[in-house]
Image: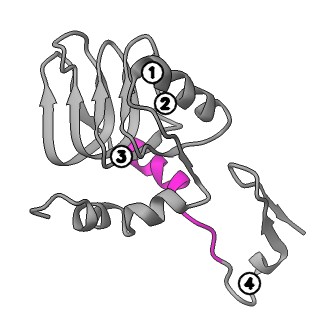
Amino acid sequence: DPTCNNSSMFSAFFGSTIAQYAASPTTKTIPNCGQANSCGSLVDAAYADGWRSFYFPDGFARNNSSGALGTANDPVTMVSAAGFNINGNIDIYGMIFSNSANVNDLGTGTADIHGALVTCAAYNNNGNGTLIYDPDVLKGTRRSTGSLVRVPGSWTDRCTASTAHPPVITCS
């Protein structure tokens, strides 16, 4: 993807376009998340409400005042073409995709990413943080990125998904 427009790089990892990912009923879109002092509370509230897949159209910023995001058993999937900026002593568990990522760009802290980070253009890490590839964490992200598909004649014909976010499945 020499132009780094996310099309082929994102599709290779997610099997869809960024627009499809953002429009999925299992994805929470959080705009205006480019400042750590406001973004942390928005993401934490969505995570507490059960969201695990996130799209940030204006970028993502988080610092140690926001604390950890996700767990090894309950990871997150985060996507933004606008970039990620992570600083301080925090842990993020899950899959991150972006055109660019700055981790500890200020040179302070040990922001650790457990799972994977895929970036198309630029990656900067000036601190002591680490990228820790964790296949078990990545397996956990698959639960939150799938979509529901009805198969005619199967038992799912008796199941419905609510319009709540995240959707609730009810089968009769």
Question: Which numbered dot is residue 71?
Answer: 2
Which numbered disc, 3 or 4, marks the residue closer to the eye?
A: 3
| Residue for badge 3 | 80
Q: Viewer-nearest of labels 1 and 4?
A: 1
Where is residue 80 drawn, in percent x and y?
Answer: 36, 46
Mark sitting earlier along the chain (2/3)? 2
Which residue sits furthest right?
172
Q: Gap between marks 4 and 2, in whole Å?
A: 34 Å
**What residue is rendered at 21% in x and 47% in y?**
119
Q: Which residues are magenta?
A: 136-149
Q: Quadrant of residue 17?
A: bottom left
Disc 1 marks a residue whose amino acid type is Ala
**Occupied quadrant, residue 41:** top right
Q: Choose the circle earlier in sequence order: 4 or 2.
A: 2
Residue under numbered circle 1: 68
Q: CA distance from mark 3 to mark 4?
A: 36 Å
Magenta stretch contains residue 2:
no
Residues marked 1 and 2 touching at CB (< 8 Å): yes
Residue underneath mark 4: 154
Horizontal arrangement in the rendering, residue 51 relative to residue 114 (left or right): right
Sequence-wise, the earlier of marks 1 and 3 is 1
Count residues near mark 3 (Cα–Cα under 10 Å), then give few for <14, some for 14-19, many for 20+: many
Disc 2, SS = loop
Q: Regarding mark 1 in the picture, which secondary structure is present there?
A: loop
Question: At which x and y percent is residue 128?
Answer: 17, 16
Q: Secondary structure at mark 4?
A: loop
Vertical side of 20 occupied by 44: above or below:
above
Q: CA distance from mark 1 to mark 4?
A: 41 Å
In the picture, the quarter occupied by the C terminus is bottom right
Q: Residues within 10 Å of mark 1 (few under 14, many from 20)?
A: some
Q: Amino acid at mark 4?
A: Ser
